[in-house]
Image (cartoon, rainbow, N blue to C red):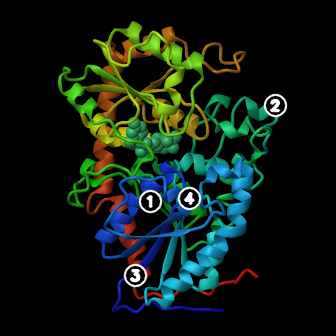
Amino acid sequence: MEEKTIASSRRAHCLVLAFPAQGHINPMIQFSKLLVHEGVKVTLCTTRSFIKKLQNLPSSMSLESISDGFDNGFEQAGSHKAYLEKFLQVGPQTLLELLDNLSQLGNPVDCIIYDSFMPWVLDIARKHGIFGASYLTQNMSVNSIYYHVQLGKIKVPLSDNEVDGILLPAMPKLQKGDLPSFFFSYEEEPTQLKLLVDQFSNIDKVDWILCNSIYELDKEIAEWTTKIWPKFRTIGPNIPSMILDNRIKNDQDYDIAQFKTEDSCIDWLDNKPKWSVIYVSFGSMVPLNEEQMEEIAYGLRDSDNYFLWVVRASEENKLPKDFAKKSEKGLIVTWCAQLKVLQHEAIACFVTHCGWNSTLKTLSIGVPTIAMPQWSDQATNAKYIVDVWKVGIRAPYYDDDNDKKKIVKRDALKKCIVEMMDGEKGNEMRKNAIQLKKLILEAASVGGSSHRNILEFVKSLEGSTCPGFEITP
Ligand code: UDP
């Protein structure tokens, strides 16, 4: 058994290992900045294939990489399943080599903070005699849902009884439409569900469980989670400091991105009245089908409000042929600086797919939402946005039960926009959003719950001895 003490004379060194996806690496980078601010040395790490795709990598921390087996591009894997299998074969060894190299260079790592999508990292940390901290990128309720699947308390596919709704501790009843999409695409995409459920395969053994969320957002589930995992801590929202207390100076830069930002949209917003523009974005991954694109396009047009719509370059060919990218009322861009956009006073509401990062940002800035979840955890986030935090309305699918395509029709979208822009409901959402924003700001500021949790984590690294480890053969 290897055991190691961090000399109190030197700063603790964390290797922050991100899963190769934009929505995963960005919050980990923001968390890393907070650690650096507290005196921790951070080396950021992800896969070689992913690093090549990224722009705006941070200069305040060193960068290392491991291999996923597809150094020339993970598209070569052909399928998600093949990719993950290869990653599991190649990743651990290259991570171990990296740790050895860093030690030999006199720059030993004390703790690996790893994306919970890679639970195998804990074994490597153990082999190396260092701490392992699992970083959860999703909402606390979503973690609980998958944990219950891992425990075998929820079986997928769901039984006929469960399809009517699931009741889990410290959570509202979840209907079918509130559950992660992978429960229903299990047969076509078993790998996705496995990836999510496996996050919790060794969670009881990790030294820390850090979650990109905020205690005050949902105290009940936070407390329930801390009871079952005493090392669970909320440390979010991991978004640039300029939105929060500006603790980290000049932290306004944008998330690292795979796409080029179109800055011109800020000038366009500058010329619009306060609270007059609908911002629409479905994040970095979700593809919409042509019919849905058309319904959104005409729903926006028919609502007769200003709109700024992010349509990624890979999606542009699905826009209706006669739909102008720039018109009197609307502007379509391929990517924008979302934080700057959400902060702009012209923005009235956000039509969103409810990805967790977008959700955290809109909650932190206090912009109400129209929820149009598409896949993965987004439906559960939408449930919280609408029914728990009451800062948004959900755009209904056309005939949810029978229409497998799950399309939000133009009239439904238009109705939501009108409700948000002209109705009592919009005012109420806006008020709630401002209150929630204050809570989040307090949690993230010095002395707030997330800040205290970060300090506790940092302190645990300094001058401490790693616990006795069981080394996996
Ligand atoms: N984003 C952005 N510009 C855009 C659209 C999205 O910067 O034009 C950012 C957004 O702020 C968020 C991320 O991309 O940080 C999307 O992450 P999320 O978890 O919301 O969704 P995903 O892309 O993982 O589906």
Residue underneath mark 1: 28
Q: CA distance from mark 2 to mark 1?
A: 39 Å
Front position among marks 2 and 1: 1
- Which x, y percent locates residue 167? 66, 40
Q: Left or right? Give the position of 104 relative to 32.
A: right
- Mark 4 vs mark 2: which is more N-terminal? 4
Q: Earlier in the sequence, mark 3 or mark 2?
A: 3
* Amino acid type at image mark 3: Ala
Query: Are there few (<14), some (14-19), or many (20+) residues within 10 Å of tag 3?
Result: many
State which quarter of the image contains the C terminus. bottom right
Q: Is mark 2 within 8 Å of ligand 1?
A: no
Q: Residues within 10 Å of mark 1 (few under 14, many from 20)?
A: many
Residue ranking furthest to the front: 72
CB-based contact (under 8 Å), mark 4 and mark 1 = no
| Residue 395 place in picture, x, y as percent | 51, 20
Question: Split into 4 quadrants, where in the image is the N terminus?
Answer: bottom right
Looking at the image, tell me whether mark 3 or mark 4 is earlier in sequence order.
3
Cα separation between marks 1 and 3: 17 Å
Can you tell which mark lies on residue 160? 2
Q: Which residue is mark 4?
A: 49
Check if mark 1's residue and mark 3's residue have beta carbons within 8 Å.
no
Tag 3 residue: 12
**Which amino acid does the dot numbered 4 rest on?**
Ser
Of the residues shown, which amino acid type is indicated by label 2?
Asp
Res. 130 in view: no
Q: Is residue 240 left or right of residue 184?
A: left
Task: Bin the neighbour count of mark 4 within 10 Å (Cα to Cα): few under 14, some 14-19, many 20 and up.
Answer: many
